[in-house]
Amino acid sequence: MILLDRVTKKYSRSEGEALNRITLHVEPKEFVIVVGQSGAGKTTLLRLLTCEERPTSGKIIVGGIDYDKLKDRDIPLLRRKIGVVFQDFKLLPNKTVFENIAFALEIVGASNREIKNTVPKVLSIVNLKGKENNMPRELSGGERQRVAIARAVVRQPRILVADEPTGNLDPKHAWDVIKVLEKINRYGTTVLLTTHNQEIVNKLKRRVVTIQGGKITSDRANAGYKT
Amino acid sequence: MKRHLITFWRIIQTGIVNFMRNIGLAIAAMAVMVVTLTIVLFSIITNATFTNTIAQITSKIDISVFLKDSVTSQQTNQLITQLQKLPNVSNVTYLSKAQALQQYEQQNTGNQQLVTAIGETSNPLPATVLIKPINLNQIQAIKSFLTEPNIAALQSDAPTYSGDREVAINKITHATDVLREIGIFAIVVFTLICALIIFNTIQMAIFNRRDEITIMRLLGASTSFIRGPFVVESAIYGIFSGIFSVLIIYSAFEAASNALQASALGLLNIAYANSYFDNHFFLLLGIQLMLGIVLGVVSSIIATRRYLKFKTK
């Protein structure tokens, strides 16, 4: 589902590599946790997957799409296939909760009826019923995070990428978010989660990939947290 | 097809909703647009008024050719035909001796003695041919035609150029030509400035919301789906600004006609300007709307471009 082959990313000539010859293979329906300290290259990895950044060298293939052959105008099509939860939520400030989630469907030209049917279902998955007409600024951090997740999954993507979705949350809310991700994974979505929350990693018992200084230092199935 | 229609409708809807949700930003942008569009409209009207004033002055100027009493009507007709064929002649009128006398009496109704005196003689006034030139600056051809010996032979006196005020007329026509050029230049300059200011304003408005564009981009929205609502929003700015600028000028005329009784301020004939505005109301409104919408749309397309770019290697 996700294939990275000796991928290197340098942001500028003078600095070192943010990612150094990373090779990673993720099977469909897998749940992979990427751990590592701040600055290790976790976010860079995800930015490469969403084509926000292009690799300096190496090959990336996601869902059968070879990024080398991807033209600029096809990037939106790629992004529609990947659900992304951003570290800083990236909600649209001038849209209500409902509209934020509906927007993801509007992009793909869904009908009004589809939107009316799907959005409430997703809202109930993330326990946000009753907040439809609130603006993002009226929500707490955890609620915003859940809106972001709802938006990422509403199109039922085959791949979900979540960048520190629990980073700004207290343990209870963090666990709520993780449970939502697990639920989505059970429905058949490949999930790539980055975190540095030790407790979550230990509880989840999933494949853990550790990145340090831009390199993969360990890749273990059913692992606990270890750096 | 249906999908495209849904998307198109959504773009318009979103544009309208965004306009209302960002009303503060919208008002700021529209205020600037209204001011600049008003200046453009004002310069258009002023220019038209100057042009009218110039036309009025020049229409009063003509060349009088005085004919000897011995000239036959055949000769007169021939002369008139010849004059009409000259390139710079717009109009030739013939005034017979009787008509000339009549006109003289009318012009001097206040001076009864003069009228009586002239009535006692056997009409000393010559028959006159009045020539209206098209362009006052190029009457040399007419002049030289009139001084040809066979033509000069028909004349009792040398032709007058609107009562020997040739020098003054020359000055006026020169001044009016300059004014007309300044007027057109002003319209062009103001329109350009207006375009720049509107472009800048919309760029600022979009700069404020660049994060939204980036987010939409990350969610996989297509260029037109992101840009569309911004274009719609800017078009709404343009529509409102166009209407407001026309309203401002309209109320200015209302106020002026009340306060000044529609008098003239030197070359600026307010009454004429007002009637020009009234007569061309829909044309002017159309121009303002076009200007507002086109500038808004073009500016928003250019301004969103930079935030829509993808990072390529």
Image (cartoon, coloured by chain):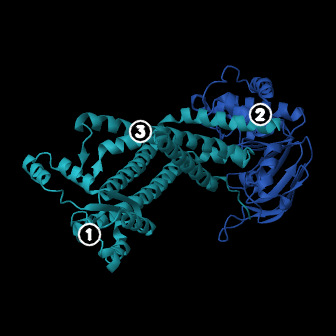
Residues A138 and A182: in front is A138
The local crowd at label 2, few if under 14, some if 14 to 19, many if 20 or more residues have their Cα within 10 Å, is some
Note whether residue A69 is visible.
yes
Give the residue drawn at x 48%, y 56%. Answer: B196
**Which is more toward the observer, B164 or B29?**
B164
Could you tell me which quadrant the N terminus of chain B lies in? top right
Looking at the image, residue A216 sits to the left or right of residue B238; the answer is right
Give the quarter of the image for residue A13: bottom right
Question: Which chain is displayed in cyan in the rendered image?
Answer: B
Residue that badge 1 annotates: B159
Q: Chain A is drawn in which colour?
A: blue
- Asked if badges 2 and 1 are on one and the same chain, I answer no
Mark 2 falls on what kind of element? helix
- Callout 1 amino acid: Pro
**Residue reaching furthest to the top:** A130
Q: What residue type is labelled 3?
A: Asp
Using the image as rendered, state which of residue B145 and residue B247 is in the foreground.
B145
CA separation, marks 3 and 1?
A: 42 Å
Q: Name the residue under label 3.
A: B278
Q: Name the residue under label 2.
A: A178
